[in-house]
């Protein structure tokens, strides 16, 4: 009574496609009905849906598509010898006569042509044809490839081993999936800028061969699962035991192993100059760098109106680590002339306070077997005091899976708090932000976890949208 997702569109796409995005449009599937219901909670969904459909429509009016639309629709970006990737839209057809009437409205004046016995019509700069229960729209070469594949010539994406491995094991209740080769990530997504550029940067890694992703509408909102083939990413597996020290109310938490290589980039989120922080990290004595090579927890809090970033790591030998803190000012003065250092106390813990000018400040302490570094004393106080922990919050448990096993990354974002903080610091002045504010407000929290083995990585992202 609940049909599986249709995947036939991939049979009309060549195996060397760079990017493939596929959406289930079968209203009989519970996955589709759940997704439509979830999407309806977002104010801009209707406008976005209609915009996408108009772009897919050859005549600019998509109002009649539902009368003949079949079980799936897909967009493929194809590998070409030129600088611009070819494209192919594949749409399942339930009523071919209705689809032909719809497409006829956008047909140009050029006479149709025949390719291997299949009629091909001109629609402005693209061409279209009906092939095996689907309508395919794209450049002439793309449409010809689809016809050849339908007639058994060439190798399709559906038979490609890398594609099958990337999508293998993805949730069967998905409403959409996507596939990208390493070339697609680096040649198309990463250079695109904006959201696509961010996606490309997150997916790219040394040794990457391909990536598959699946989107499902599932409690507490939506779930995105990503398989990356090749390359295990920058972090080593670990069990996130420091999560038990992250205080309740944190706006964000990141758990990784091997943080020392990316410390300056992440610390720059506090607004400091990343180049300065990079020099600071490079000057830190080995006794303090060693803990940062193991498990590290980063947390973002906002006491009052300021943002505080705190880094937690296992101290190992507390006496040795504390002695290294006492000597820290000397090496740092080589990169921060005028650095001032003093010993103070925060929440009963001895703290080394480092200041340089008005912008740079770090507070560091060792207690309870942990090295704690923060951009303000409130960060150390939040870890030092109280028993309420982030992992006990309902919002955290809804979006972060059980963390008792090994992972390569764990992330939690209290999206609601982050938006309010960003608005207080000027984001509300942005016209672009105001246009999507109502939609972003529907996301309560976001959780991310990843694990990897044998050169492959699986990541899961959960969105809480009450």
Image (tube, rainbow, N blue to C red):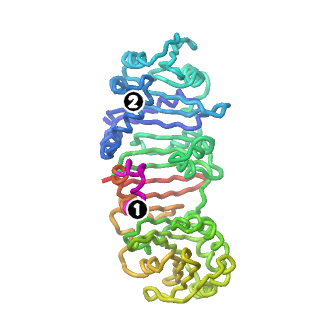
Give how far apart the Cα atoms at labels 1 and 2 are: 38 Å
54 relative to 213 in the view: left or right: left
Q: Quadrant of residue 331?
A: bottom right
Observer-nearest of 162 and 115: 115
Which secondary structure is most common in the magenta stretch? helix
Name the residue located 59 percent from the left edge and 67 percent from the top edge: 273
> At which x and y percent is residue 444?
35, 57
Q: Which residues are magenta?
A: 418-437
Q: Which mark is residue 26?
A: none
As drawn, which residue projects farthest toward the right? 334
Residue named by callout 1:
418
> At which x and y percent is residue 285?
66, 79
Q: Based on the picture, tell me whether residue 24 belongs to the magenta stretch.
A: no
Name the residue located 48 percent from the left edge and 88 percent from the top edge: 345
> At which x and y percent is residue 87?
55, 30
Observer-nearest of 309 and 307: 307
Vertical arrangement, residue 111 with respect to residue 133, above or below = above
Vertical arrangement, residue 272 with respect to residue 1, above or below = below
111 relative to 436 in the view: left or right: right
Name the residue located 52 percent from the left edge and 82 percent from the top edge: 369
Residue named by callout 2:
71
* Kind of element beneath mark 2: strand
Vertical arrangement, residue 172 with respect to residue 124, above or below = below
Q: How many marks?
A: 2
């Amino acid at each position: 009574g609940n049909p599986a997702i249709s995947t036939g569109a991939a049979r009309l796409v060549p195996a060397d496609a760079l990017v493939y995005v596929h959406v289930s449009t079968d209203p009989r599937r519970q996955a589709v009905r759940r997704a439509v219901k979830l999407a309806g909670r977002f104010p801009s969904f209707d406008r976005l849906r209609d915009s996408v459909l108009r772009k897919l429509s050859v005549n600019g009016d998509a109002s009649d598509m539902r009368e003949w639309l079949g079980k799936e629709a897909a967009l493929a970006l194809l590998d070409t010898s030129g600088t611009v990737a070819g494209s192919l839209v594949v749409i399942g057809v339930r009523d071919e006569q209705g689809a032909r009437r719809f497409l006829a409205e956008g047909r140009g004046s050029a006479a149709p042509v025949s390719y291997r016995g299949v009629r091909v019509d001109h629609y402005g700069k693209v061409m279209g044809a009906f092939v095996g229960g689907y309508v395919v729209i794209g450049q002439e070469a793309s449409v010809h490839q689809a016809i050849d594949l339908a007639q058994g010539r060439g190798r399709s994406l559906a038979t490609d081993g890398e594609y099958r491995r990337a999508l293998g094991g993805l949730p069967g209740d998905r409403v959409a999936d996507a596939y990208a080769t390493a070339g697609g990530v680096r040649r198309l997504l990463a250079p695109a800028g904006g959201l696509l550029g961010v996606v490309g940067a997150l997916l790219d890694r040394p040794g990457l061969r391909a990536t598959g992703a699946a989107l499902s509408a599932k409690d507490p909102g939506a779930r995105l699962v990503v398989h990356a083939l090749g390359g295990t990413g920058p972090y080593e597996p670990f069990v996130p035991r420091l999560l038990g020290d992250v205080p309740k109310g944190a706006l964000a938490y990141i758990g990784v192993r091997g943080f020392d290589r990316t410390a300056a980039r992440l610390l720059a989120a506090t607004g400091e100059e990343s180049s300065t922080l990079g020099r600071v990290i490079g000057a830190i004595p080995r006794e303090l760098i060693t803990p940062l090579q193991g498990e590290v927890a980063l947390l973002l809090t906002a006491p009052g109106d300021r943002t505080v970033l705190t880094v937690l790591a296992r101290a190992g030998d507390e006496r040795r680590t504390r002695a290294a803190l006492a000597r820290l000012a000397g090496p740092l003065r080589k990169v921060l002339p005028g650095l001032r250092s003093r010993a103070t106390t925060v929440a009963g813990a001895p703290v080394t306070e480092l200041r340089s000018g008005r912008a740079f400040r770090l507070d560091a302490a060792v207690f309870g077997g942990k090295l704690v570094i923060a951009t303000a004393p409130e960060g150390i106080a939040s870890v030092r005091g109280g028993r309420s922990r982030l992992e006990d919050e309902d919002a955290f448990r809804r979006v972060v899976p059980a963390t008792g096993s090994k992972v390569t990354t764990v992330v939690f974002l209290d999206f609601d708090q982050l938006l309010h903080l960003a608005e207080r610091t000027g984001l509300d002045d942005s016209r672009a932000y105001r246009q999507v504010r109502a939609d972003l407000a529907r996301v309560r929290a976001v959780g991310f976890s990843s694990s990897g083995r044998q050169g492959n990585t699986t990541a899961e992202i959960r969105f809480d949208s009450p």
